Image (cartoon, rainbow, N blue to C red):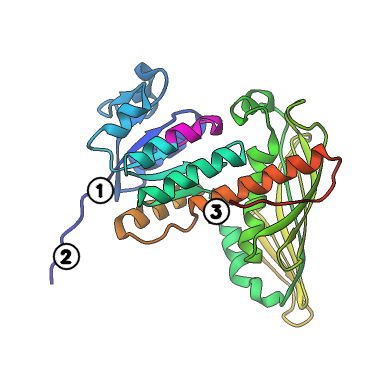
Amino acid sequence: MSHERRPPLGIGLIGLGHHGSRYAKHLIHDLPEARLVAVCRRHAEEGSGLVSAPTVPCYADYHELIADPLVEAVVVVTPPSLNRDICVAVAEAKKALLVEKPLATTADEARMIAQAARGSGQIMMTAQTLRFDATIRMLRQRQAQIGLLQYLSLSSRMEPHGMSEESRGFGGRGCLLETGIHLLDLVRLVTGENVRTAACEMDVVPPDGAERRILGRLTTERGAVCLFDVSRVTSGRVGRIELIGAEGQLSADWCGQRVMQVSARHGTGDWPTKAEPTVLSALRAFVRSVRDGSPPPVSIEDGKRAVEIAETCYASARLGGQAVRVEYR
């Protein structure tokens, strides 16, 4: 029996900054099931040269890229303060969408994107790329070994350089949206629950400035406690999640690429993992969902809920760390 080979999915990429260029390179070199057919950046004359693909048209106006008949799906890698208008335009054009995290800078804008996505009838996915990290995948595979989850802790610490520039695209907000959004998403992933309340302290609370340090406590719907810290104040990087269960403890270090276990019943373990490009994995999952019509592994709703948790963290910090209930709409 012969199987007709499907043509590669035509993808338009909006955003060719440092991160967007990574998406472009993967689309050109590493993803035969997709084809980069158009790009968009404000200075269109620089676009094709940046992706080493002079035959790919570059638009200065994202509306023109979305309208291009060769573009079947759109990947958005722009500063999140621009995401709302772009994502709504993609949804209205009835084209598939992959958008980099965070979905938006505020809960209201994230909800607008989610509403448009629901009405589009198309595959819409948030690129919460840490879900595709090899350490997180191994953690998920071994999670049952530690029994009923008691509580968890998460940390993401990075160097301070570049924050003042990058915060401009985050609506005056800082590292909670920039990197901490990964942790807020992971809490929902590993607990299988929504977050019910958030209590957070920040070194500075927007709009007085972009935060560089957050300490927080989340509780889930069934009462699991999640402690987290996010910062951009020190040299070196730390990325870690630790699960404490009734029968053991399990931690994943995605900067060091290791998963470790401590358990009286199952013994100890220390397993290195192989670093893989998470952007490529997210792209591959998106293309597969579009071609097969299957639900994406990270929905727009997932992206919205992470931003809604972040919004609650900001509200709590403005109240001096008081616990605030998360509103999902």
Q: Which residue is drawn at 35% across and 52% down?
A: 121
Cα separation between marks 2 and 3 = 35 Å
Overall secondary structure of the magenta stretch?
helix
Residue bearing mark 3? 302
Residue, x 28% and y 32% (percent of image)? Answer: 67
Asked which secondary structure carries label 2, the reply is loop
> Magenta part of the protein: which range?
76-86
Residue in the picture at 41% in, 55% down: 285
Choose between 59 and 86: the one closer to the eye: 86
Left or right: residue 163 compared with residue 41: right
Cβ atoms at labels 1 and 2 below 8 Å apart? no
Question: Is residue 70 among the parts visible in the rendering?
Answer: yes
**Is residue 188 left or right of 210 when viewed as pictured?**
left
Q: Find residue 321 and name its label.
A: none
- Hey, what amino acid is under mark 2? His
Please name whichever residue, 69 or 237, is drawn nearer the observer in this view of the structure: 69
The residue that appears at 72% across and 62% down in the rendered structure is 220
Q: Where is residue 300 drawn, in percent x and y? A: 49, 50
Q: Which of marks 2 and 3 is in front?
A: 3
Mark 1 lies on residue: 8
Return the residue nearer the eye: 146 or 185.
Answer: 185
Q: Which mark is residue 3?
A: 2
Q: Marks 1/3: CA distance?
A: 27 Å
Camera sees residue 272: no
> Which of pointers 2 and 3 lies earlier in the amino acid sequence?
2
Within 10 Å of disc 3 (Cα), the crowding (few <14, some 14-19, many 20+) is: many
Q: Is 84 contained in the magenta span?
A: yes
How far is the residue under mark 1 from the one under mark 2? 15 Å
Q: In this view, does 29 lie above or below 220?
A: above
